[in-house]
Each structure stands twice: as C-alpha cells, then as structure tokens.
Image (cartoon, grey):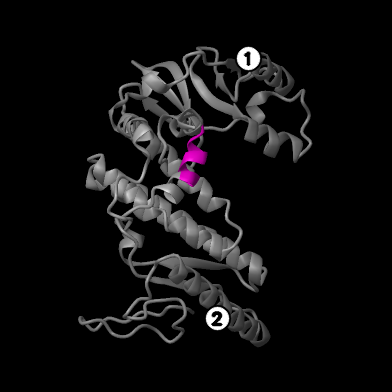
Amino acid sequence: MVKLLDEHPALSEYLMPLYFPKGDGRGPRVAPAAAGERDRSENALFATPVRELATRDVVTARASVSILDAVQSMSMRRAGALVIVDEADSPVGMLTLADLRDRVLVHRKSLLDPVSDIMSAPIIRVDGSDLCFEALLKMMSHEVHHLLVMDAGSLTGIVSSHDFMVLQVTSPLMLLRDIESQSSVEGLASSSGKVTALISMLLGEGAKAASINRIITTVNDRIERTILDLALKTLGPPPVPFCWIVYGSAGRKEQTFITDQDNGVIYADPRSEEEAREAKAYFSRFAEFCVNAFLRCGFALCLGEFMATNPSGANPSPSGGNTSATG
C-alpha cells in the first residue's frame, strides 16, 4: 500500500486526509511510512537546482522545417516539446502538443507550412543554478508549462510542469490545475480551501515572504478569473464591453492570505437608453454572482463596500475618499 501511495501522489493526496485527519491531536496527518517521502519531496523544491531536474535530451529543429517534419521528430523521440532554433542553434521558440492542437488541428493548418508559423515565442528561460522553487514561480507567473534551462548562455535542458509535480507531493501547479478545471462555484470553493494548506507548506519550508506573496497572489488571481469565466458562462455575453478591476492588496499583488474583497466593474458607455437598461441589469446580476462566489471561496465582504455590488459608490473612507464600484 505504501509503495502504491508513493508512486501515485494524487491517490495519496485523496486518501491520507481520510485516514489521518489533520488536527485530531493523535499524530501526523500522513502515515509514518509515507511522511519521510513527503518531507523529502517538499524539501527538494527549495533545495534542488533546476538543472538537476531538467531533461538533458532536448529535441530541437530548425525554424524552417515543416510542421510535419517537426511532429515526426517529436514522435520519434517521444518528446512533449520541441525547441525551435535558428541557424546559430539559439532557441527562438517552442512547439508543444497544445500548439499542435490549438494552431494546427483547430485551424486546419497545412502540415507543409514552416514550424515557425505555429511555434510559441518568445520562450521563457531559467538559469540552471536557479532553485526549482524559483523556476516554479516563473512558470506560474508566465502561465507556461515548459521552461528552457540555460547554463552560461547555452541550452542545457528543458523542464516541464509535470517534472515539478513529480518532484513534490503538494504542488502549487496541481492546485492551479485543480482550480482551472472546476465548472461550478461549489467545486471552486472546495479547491480554494487548499490555499491555506499551501501557505502552511511554504511557511514550513522557510520560503521568503516575497515568494509566498507571488505564489498566493497568482493562485488567488486564478480563482478570481475562474469565477469571472463561470459568471460569463452562466449569464451569457455582456451587452457592452467591460473590465473587472481589483483594488487593495489584490491590485498591488501583495496578498499572503485570502483577504476581503475590493473590486468593481467598468463598462463601455451604452449607445442607447435601451442598451443602458440592459447593461445596468446585466452587470448588476454579474456583480452579484461574482461577489457571492468570492465570498463562498473565502474572500470576505468589504466592510467599506468597495465592491461591484455597490452601484452608488463605497462608503467614505476615514480620509474622506469615495469610489464608484460600477459605472
């Protein structure tokens, strides 16, 4: 059983809380036999240079080769990513399975076109001496799943999000994927509850406050974006273009723990009185949906009412300021 849990972290993450509940005062949350493995996996994230995790056998191709030739190279080498290089062998782009799906299959692009037409560029790089934790931060902030590993200006490897998931049991990347996969507010609320455990893990590993801020801000931002997507799917397209805005610690990207809400909606001027009525009704429902969803996900209501559900403006602050939540 222990071997099975060690080889399948997702299964371990699901079963362990059931049999070793947290905070019951009778022992650790994880089974003693598995605790050592988990400690080592979490420590590795903060102690391992990314060059030790990176795949050294990088598959490359010239930017001028056809998409078909590029795909054949990936297939022959069983590679999930192909690095595109110029005539001087310097990386200029990357081709992933997602690129093939979204830019070739969906748009029915000719396989004879050059691979440079569909590659992702520019590519994000990390230094081989960077810690895996630093590389993970960069991957999350740029929303990519592969990073090039460079040493002394030369390409020496490639690291993927899967590599980080294998390295550690409790992964911020796994939490992000869990958040993005949710199709309901109920499921998202369950996922957002894992943020506290993530903070505890980061604090326990001695992560710097600035690093924790960056990760938690990224996670919270992804929760908010997922809620906005759910609102649009539930209510349908808006009558006029709009922008969702955030204030306070979220706007400054200084969140460490989930705090209260500070948000609003700005939408384009309606072109007629009828469109104005439609816009007012739509964004009233939209704001109500989002604010309630944020509340269910742990973001408390703002005591000063700096929220999108307040159409007439927030209560004056001690300094006498005022703001409009919608308009």
Amino acid identity at mark 1: Arg
Q: Earlier in the sequence, mark 2 or mark 1?
A: 1
Task: Say whether marks 2 and 1 touch (CB < 8 Å).
Answer: no
270 within the magenta span: no
Helix, strand or loop for the magenta stretch, by majority: helix
Question: Which residue is disc 2 drawn over?
Answer: 284
**Image mark for residue 111:** none
Foreground mark, 2 or 1, reads: 1
Q: Which residues are magenta?
A: 8-15
Quadrant hosting residue 280: bottom right
How many marks do you count on the picture? 2
Using the numbered discs, state the Cα–Cα distance from disc 2 to disc 1 in whole angstroms.
54 Å
Q: Which residue occupies the foreground of this view, 45 or 246? A: 45
* Residue 87 found in image quarter: top right
Q: Is residue 12 magenta?
A: yes
* Position of residue 257 measured from the top left corner of the image (x, y, whole percent): 31, 58
Instruction: Look at the image and tell me whether residue 226 can be seen.
Output: yes
- For label 2, the SS is helix
Residue sitting nearer the eye, 155 or 219: 219
Residue type highlighted by circle 2: Ser
Q: Foreground residue, 280 or 286?
A: 286
Element type where label 1 sits in the image: helix
Residue placed under numbered mark 1 in the picture: 77
User: Would residue 122 be seen by someone viewing this image from the given angle?
Assistant: no
Q: Is residue 66 left or right of residue 189?
A: right
- The residue carrying pointer 2 sits among few (fewer than 14), some (14 to 19) or many (20 or more) residues within 10 Å by Cα, namely some
Against 86, residue 168 (above or below) is below
